[in-house]
Image (spheres, rainbow, N blue to C red):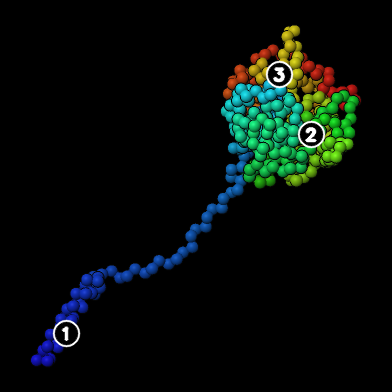
Amino acid sequence: MKVTSFARNATAVATLLVAGLAACGGGSDNEPAPTAPPVATNPPPETPVDPLAKAPAEVRTTWFGISNWHYQAGDLGFILDGEVVNSGRTPTPAAVTKALEALKLRGSVDFFLVGHEHGDHALQIPEYAKQTGKPIYAPANVCKAVVAYGNPEGQCVTINGGETLKMNDFVTVRVVRWLHSLDCDQIGTGSEGVETFGFLITVQTPQKEKLLSIYASDSGAGGQDLFIPRVVAKGTASEKTYGAPFTNLANAVSEANIENIDLWQGGPESRVVNQARVLMPAFKMKYFQPHHLGTRATSVDGVSVGFKLEYGLHFPYLPSEVPKLTAFMATEGVEAQNPLNYFDAWVLNKDSYRTADNANVKAVYGLPATGPGPGKQGPNPRSGQLECTND
């Protein structure tokens, strides 16, 4: 009896074990063998991101009267001065709106540079500030006008010279304390005129070793004046002496780590030969553009014609009127790119500086796609005065 009972119990236990194994998926010769855990492998190395992949290969420049320049380097655009009326004592909102709408057809407006405070350079700046909300970099008196117009105080940054403005990963602007223009046979002592600045613009291209460079000076004329330090508030308790213009530019070029300046946009057009004799060989300049044109009234068929963008440049800039400058540039191998009309555009790259189509922008003002017009041109009101006897 005991043996039979034990055997019966053992059989029951075995039956339960088999059932349990079946329920758990075990105990069957038909089940697949357990899969071995995956062996850890190193992920493939990531492709390094080229920091210059989005660097601009060129800079587009647009001249729209007097010392007004628009620059577009990749997705960054900015304006120098921007005076579009050259009359009155207060800004003209409609004229500013029109200029902004035209320029934005080919680029953007992300900040402003101002060379000096005179009305033919800076009168519209407070309105530009109001309409765009973008930062302004300007002399102290211009910033005061921007704030007095109702713009935020922090929108305008006062410049003194020597500042380095890194605007994005590729575009840098260095502020150069410069000098205002002088009359024939006048030699400055360093304290004449208003605070005046030039701007050394450098643009990193996709080629690591190549930076495009532009020096824009909206005023200034003189040779030896370039070596006289600038003095502000002379004879007062606030007197301060800054470096000589040539030294200031040389320092900016050195800090930018460039071997030469590709393009010099020098103004005004008068007496610029004095500066050219110093700057062109010193900085191995390749291209030159005169500006500060179209600012004064001239007479066409007995009718006085003044600055008006819709009229077109009302007198030509002729190399024959600057024979000394023309001859000197030829000896230095410097190429001139003279504006023919408002909103002329060019493209600077590592190989050249050439005119560019800007027809749709010009059409806003009724200007022809190329050449002067639509108004008839007369003589340059400064004819015979662009170079002085002793220059």
Q: Any mark on residue 38, and which?
A: none
SS under mark 1: helix
Q: Any mark on residue 10, and which?
A: 1
Residue at x 65%, y 23% (from the top left corner): 92
Q: Which residue is mark 2?
A: 195
State which quadrant residue 24 falls in: bottom left
Q: Tell me how far mark 3 sits from mark 2, CA to CA.
A: 25 Å
Q: Nearer the viewer, mark 3 or mark 1?
A: 3
SS under mark 3: loop
Q: Position of residue 198 (x, y in %)?
A: 76, 35
Mark 3 / mark 2, whichever is N-terminal: 2
Q: Nearer the viewer, mark 3 or mark 2?
A: 2
Residue placed most toward the observer, 112 or 328 = 112
Residue at x 83%, y 39% (from the top left corner): 238
Alpha-carbon neighbours of circle 3 within 10 Å: few (<14), some, or many (≥20)?
A: many
Q: Which residue is mark 3?
A: 307
Q: Position of residue 364 (x, y in %)?
A: 59, 21
State which quadrant residue 265 falls in: top right
Alpha-carbon neighbours of circle 2 within 10 Å: few (<14), some, or many (≥20)?
A: many
Q: Tell me how far mark 2 sits from mark 1, CA to CA.
A: 110 Å
Residue farthest toward the top in the current orientation of the protein: 302
Q: Report whether residue 256 is seen.
A: yes
The quarter of the rendered structure image containing the N terminus is bottom left
Q: Position of residue 247 (x, y in %)?
A: 82, 41
Residue at x 62%, y 24% (from the top left corner): 93
Image side of residue 254 versus residue 373, left or right: right
Mark 3 / mark 1, whichever is N-terminal: 1
Mark 3 in CB contact with mark 1 (< 8 angstroms): no
Disc 2 residue type? Glu
